[in-house]
Amino acid sequence: MTMQRYAEALNSALREEMARDDTVWLFGEDVSTYGGVFKVSKGLRDEFGPERVLDTPISEQTLTAMAVTAAMTGTRPVLEIMYADFMPLTLDALVNQASIYEYIWADQVQMPFVLRTQGGGGAGAGAQHSKSLDVLVAHVPGIKVVAPATPADAKGLLKAAIRDPHPVVFLEHKLLYNSRDEVPDGDHLCEIGKARTAREGSDVSIFATSKMVHDALKAATELEADGISAEVIDLRTLRPLDNTAIVQSVKKTNHAVVVNEGWRFCGFGAELSATIMEQAFDDLDAPVERLGTFDMPIPYSEPLETSVLPDAEKIAAAARRALR
Amino acid sequence: MTTDIKITGAGGEYMESVTVVEWVVKPGDPVAAGNVVVVVETAKAATEVEAPIDGILSEIVVNVGAEADIGAVLGRISDGSEPFDTAAEAVAENPALVSVETSPNAQDLPSDVPIEQPANGRILATPLARRIAAELSINLASVNGTGPKGRIKRRDVELVSAEPVASPAGSEQCVLTIPSVPSNVDEYDQFAPGSYEIRPHDSMRKMIAARLAEAKQTIPHFYLKATCDLDSLIRLRTEINTSIPKDADGRSAYKISINDFVIKAHAKALSEVRDANVSWSDSGMIVHHSVDVSVAVAIPGGLITPIIRNANTKPISTISLEMKDLASRAFERQLAPNEYQGGTTSISNLGMFGVEEFAAIINPPQATILAVGAGRRVAVVRDEIVDVATQMTVTLSVDHRAVDGALGAELLQSFRRYIESPLDMLV
């Protein structure tokens, strides 16, 4: 095990995969010379050369179409979209090309590319740089969506995503880049589509992704002081969703809180909530509590921003409501 | 919109005013049409006033202890169309920026609406609670929900399943939780939509359902049957009835019925076999000092059991007059609770319908009930000769926890002796 920051773990994953497979290459805005605005690709240009680590103009739509065609023609591109807020610009390539070409052309085409991006609020970055648009891509069949919460999972999942023969959208969180934790040494891989029990508990299950896992863990600590045993399930992958883990946990605790940092309306929590209702209805002893970001643009002002985003306090309150 | 709760004169023209004895529900509590909301006392009886509509008790106008004239408004029920003070926590869902300060809380609010447990007959229970209740054969109507809106949760079902059978537990009154909603609505699925209508239960129907279901499920009943010759009793009754003083129109001041004799005979028998004049409780046998006979009286929409107190010591004529008065007032639902609560045994007579015999369900916390069939002319064998006799079959239902077989048989034997030698009742 090595203590690493989340950004460093991602950097290791990229380095290891580029060294292992010379069809892997990186491109995006400021990823090469500058090393990425969050330093995820730091040092890789020096190590692998400007041919495999490319700076690009600001044109997310074109970049994503490039990723699609580069993947189709036999390489494994890793595209960085600087902010998840720019994801709408990538959607035509994702929704009308990447997600359907394998289907249309059956075995003739493979689409092994990774689109990395980072989202989330809490950094005072304002309404255009704080969103979590997970569901824009999770909605689309044919695209895998992962959202690691820890450095270890960041590394293991990014390596798995690069090796995956299908398009993967890799959702990072700006407030997690500096978080430090142990990362397994060696060729560490995490299976896409498998949730992780971040904390065992018996009274209520909290299902979360990305940074919300950490808020859920804080909430669980707070709840423990009240004698409430909360289980925290880090879903890690939004699609394909680990239904088995979700149902197992609900069967154990009979109470569920679902949290996703995206907007609550039509958000990922709605999918989780419906899944629980469909697959664990007879195990529910309370309605599912659903948390998301309040239905409005994310404010720049810190107190206002704090008030609209889900956090540990709101998660703990939701768990208590579920247990009434 | 609110609807007034009024006491009308329909219960009896003699009433001029009533005193409020008890508000059964608190302001803000949900009420269902037909459920009791307030108990008032008239000169003659305590009367339960039922909610005219489903809704929430929004206001008490006449407080406990205060008097109100007939027709006066006692309280008001809101149908929920306007906000009610203590429930006015509805949150506007407008996510306008100006509401940012309060808006985060809005999403944290559960989807609960301020109005509590719906009065449309549906039981609120979580899926898990329903599943466990089904597995344990627990009727959700008997479970008290402690979740939001009175929702039944797993803990509530488990509490019921953990409890031993409800019993009088040392108190003379059997305390029953009367469910405020009808039992499982899933039953509706059995019938084609449109092939039925739902008639809401009134409080009497709910009381009957709850008490008798509980009795049949928790009391270990056994049954003793005896056939009694009635000829002597019929002769005696005719003699008595012809000797009753008549008024100017030639009408008797009273007329003794067979049932009056049955009441007297049962009471005399119980006063002889005192060990059967008891009630079971977990903490000890309740041994009654007096013999008070509850007599089941069918009334529109249900039945009630007015009591002839100390029936063993009362003359038949007194029993007859009391019974007539109680039955007619029962018919008008004008009985005070102490007139129908607290008997030590019961009699149910379906003989007038030609029912030959039947077995009745014990009326808790009593230990016995006598089911009386019709008198009928039958061929009997006496001294090796076939003869014609009038006979009546009675069935005694007995709570085996309180009264054993031999004791019950002794009681029935004594009853039969009085019926067949009726003069003994009079001396």
Image: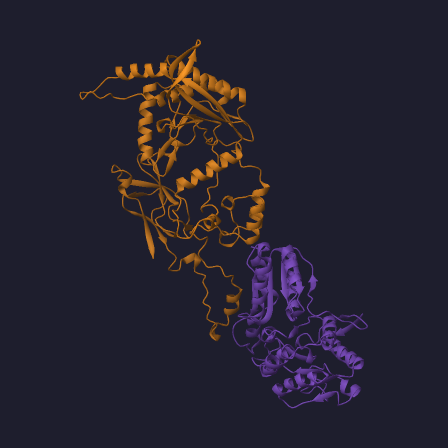
**Visual hue assigned to chain A:** purple
Residue B300 occupies which quadrant of the picture? top left
* Residue A262 or residue A221, whichever sits in front: A262
Left or right: B4 with respect to B132? left
Left or right: A180 with respect to B250? right
Residue B83, image x, y percentages = 40, 60
User: Which residue is pictured at 52% across the width and 75% down the height?
Assistant: A296
Tell me, what colour scheme is on the image? by chain
Residue B342, image x, y percentages = 43, 30
Residue B144, image x, y percentages = 51, 46
A16 w.r.t. B375: above or below:
below
Q: Which residue occupies the extreme top position in the image?
A: B383
* Residue A265 or residue A193, whichever sits in front: A193
Which chain did the image draw in orange?
A: B
Residue B418, image x, y percentages = 41, 15
Residue A224 occupies which quadrant of the picture? bottom right
Q: Which residue occupies the extreme left position in the image?
A: B248
Residue A124 occupies which quadrant of the picture? bottom right
- Could you tell me if residue A132 is visible in this image? no
User: Which residue is pictured at 48% across the width and 34% down the height?
Assistant: B174
Q: How many marks?
A: 0
B87 w.r.t. A298: above or below:
above
B249 w.r.t. B340: above or below:
above
Q: Quadrant of the N terminus of chain A?
A: bottom right
A150 w.r.t. B324: above or below:
below
Left or right: A56 with respect to B57? right
Q: Quadrant of the C terminus of chain A?
A: bottom right
- Could you tell me if residue B301 is visible in this image? yes
